[in-house]
Amino acid sequence: MSRIITITNQKGGVGKTTTTINLATCLAQAGKRVLVVDMDPQGNASSGFGVDKFSLQKTVYNLLIGEATLEEVILPVCVDGVRLLPANIDLSGAEIELIAMNEREFRLRTIFSQSRYMFDYILMDCPPSLNLLTVNALCAADSVLIPIQCEYYALEGLSQLMNTIKRIQQKLNTRLVIEGVVFTMYDSRTNLSNQVVDEVKRHLGAYTYKTIVPRNVRLSEAPSHGLPITLYSADSKGAEAYRALALEVMERNKK
């Protein structure tokens, strides 16, 4: 049985997609079967794996509205062991169409109910908003992983996100738990990065990962080449961090 993890934060630019791509890659390189679900109409997780999102015939959009099956949408990518449910701008129309559907919050849960056994991990990259696409991902998930950028504004929306997760747990998905909080774009030279880490640990200490992802030039460059960091620059600090994070995720799931 797979572990379904939604990677979300309603604030943009905190490293959700970077974490999804690179965590999936490192899990696969550790021998796990991984499915990445791109739930963002921007399609950055798709292009981050080198997929031309503009030429796609079928995407998560078609899957959600019942126009395609999982087998028709799923794609191989540049990483052995990783498969992708891609997205592009078409997905922005899904929210309007989902509103009229029965059980609209549970479309993804239904889709994965018969197919999750095919993978060890399913990672879902969500848009930077708490919309119906994100709610679908949270309702389908076993757990939620929250990337937090080590900057002041990253703290502002955290309480809102935690309240949303609590409401989902109470009303829509009672099995949902917090997988963990991962700090991204950390700069050890600044007091602010350390203050953000200390503040979050004070409130969510039990959930924070030991691994902290540093601000890293190679990590920023990799998406423009359509490659995960371990294929673009395997010995960079960014690659080291995501390999360590994957080990932590696997260790937590053993427990």
Image: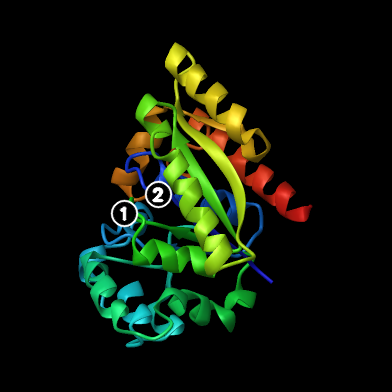
Name the quarter where the N terminus is drawn.
bottom right
Q: Earlier in the sequence, mark 2 or mark 1?
A: 2
Q: Amino acid at mark 1?
A: Asn
**Protein image colouring:** rainbow
Q: Nearer the viewer, residue 117 or 205?
A: 205
Instruction: Label 1: state its secondary structure.
Output: helix
Q: Is residue 27 visible?
A: yes
* Residue 101 picture location, percent across and down: 34, 85
* Residue 208 picture location, percent across and down: 61, 36
Instruction: Name the residue at the right extreme.
Output: 255
- Mark 1 sits on what residue? 44
Q: Amino acid at mark 2?
A: Thr
- Mark 2 sits on what residue? 17
Q: Is residue 65 above or below residue 192?
A: below
Instruction: Label 2: state its secondary structure.
Output: helix
Point 34% across, 45% down: residue: 223
